[in-house]
Image (cartoon, rainbow, N blue to C red):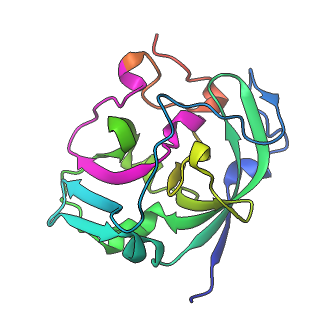
C-alpha cells in the first residue's frame, strides 16, 4: 500500500479554534435524519455522474482501494457544539479528479447519501485539500451511527455538510440546494461567519 499522506486542516492552526456561538464537547454526538441504514459491502457502490465526460461507478473494493489520506481536523455542528482533534482516514475528494473528467461547465458538487439525503458544495469547497471521504475516525472504523461505510468530512464548513452513508457525487452546472439547504440552512455554511441559516 502507498504511503498515506498526512493533512492538517488549516482551522487546527488557528490560535482560537472554536468558532463564535460554539461550545466544545468530547466525542461526537449522534445527530441525523431518519434511521441508521445497514449496508452490504458486496453490493455497495459509489457513483460519479452529472457534468462529467463519462459516468463512473465503483465497487467497495475499488473505492476503498484508492490512495488514502489522513486528515487532522476539528468539526463544528450547526446546533452549537464543536469537537476538536480528530483524525479521519479515507479518500481525498481530490482523488475523484483521477476517476472522471469534469466538463468545463461543472461548478458545484451535490453529494448523495442513503435515503436521498443530499448536500451541496461549490467545487472550491469540495476539492479543498482537507476534504475526505472517511472510512475511519481516530483509528477506528466509523460506526453505523456516524456514517459507515463512508462519511464525507468537510472540516472548514458546518458538520451537516459532511454527509453520512455517502453513495456518490453528482457534478452540477449550477448551484442547487441540498436536503437541509432546501429547508432553510445556509447554502455555504462557514462556522467562522456563523452561516447557519438563510436570512
Across the whole image, how many numbered discs are drawn on residues?
A: 0
Residue drawn at (39%, 17%), measured in percent from left and top?
A: 183
Asked whether 48 falls inside the magenta stretch, the response is no
Q: Please tell me whether residue 65 is drawn above or below residue 151 in the rendered image.
A: below
Residue 140 appears left or right of 63: right
Nearer-the-camera pick, 35 or 96: 35
145 or 123: nearer the eye? 145
Q: Position of residue 118 (x, y in %)?
A: 36, 37
Decide: is 146 above or below 188.
below
Residue positioned 18% across, 54% down in the render: 51
Report whether residue 129 is seen: no
Residue lying farthest to the bottom in this orientation = 1
Residue 131 position within the rendered picture, expressed as x and y whole percent measured from the top left? 53, 55
The part of the chain drawn in magenta is: 158-182
Work out whether residue 54 or residue 15 is closer to the camera in this orientation and state it: 54
Question: The N terminus lies in which quarter of the figure?
Answer: bottom right
Is residue 169 within the magenta segment? yes
**Residue at position x 45%, y 61% in the image:** 93
Whole-percent x, y for residue 190 in the image:
57, 32
Q: Residue furthest left?
A: 53
- Residue 43 pos. (x, y %): 33, 64
Q: Residue at x 65, y 22 (%)?
A: 79
Q: Is 143 displayed left or right of 40 in the figure?
A: right
> Is residue 140 visible to us here?
yes
Name the one closer to the observer, 97 or 162. 162
Q: Quadrant of residue 148?
A: bottom right
Q: From this view, report whether residue 94 is shown above or below residue 61.
A: above
Amino acid at each position: 500500500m502507498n504511503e498515506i499522506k498526512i493533512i492538517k486542516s488549516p482551522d487546527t492552526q488557528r490560535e482560537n479554534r472554536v468558532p463564535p456561538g460554539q461550545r466544545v464537547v468530547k466525542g461526537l454526538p449522534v445527530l441525523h435524519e431518519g434511521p441508521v441504514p445497514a449496508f452490504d459491502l458486496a453490493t455497495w457502490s459509489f457513483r460519479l455522474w452529472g457534468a462529467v465526460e463519462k459516468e463512473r461507478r465503483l465497487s467497495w473494493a475499488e473505492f476503498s482501494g484508492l490512495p488514502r489520506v489522513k486528515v487532522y481536523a476539528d468539526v463544528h455542528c450547526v446546533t452549537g457544539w464543536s469537537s476538536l482533534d480528530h483524525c479521519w482516514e479515507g479518500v481525498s475528494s481530490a482523488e475523484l479528479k483521477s476517476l472522471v473528467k469534469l466538463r468545463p461547465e461543472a461548478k458545484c458538487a451535490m453529494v448523495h447519501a442513503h435515503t436521498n439525503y443530499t448536500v451541496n458544495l461549490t467545487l472550491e469547497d469540495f476539492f479543498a485539500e482537507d476534504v475526505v471521504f472517511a472510512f475511519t475516525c481516530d483509528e477506528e472504523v466509523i460506526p453505523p451511527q456516524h456514517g459507515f461505510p463512508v462519511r464525507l468530512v468537510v472540516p472548514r464548513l458546518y458538520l451537516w455538510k459532511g454527509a453520512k452513508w455517502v453513495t456518490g457525487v453528482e457534478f452540477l452546472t449550477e448551484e442547487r440546494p441540498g436536503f437541509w439547504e432546501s429547508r432553510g440552512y445556509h447554502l455555504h455554511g462557514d462556522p467562522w461567519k456563523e452561516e447557519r441559516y438563510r436570512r
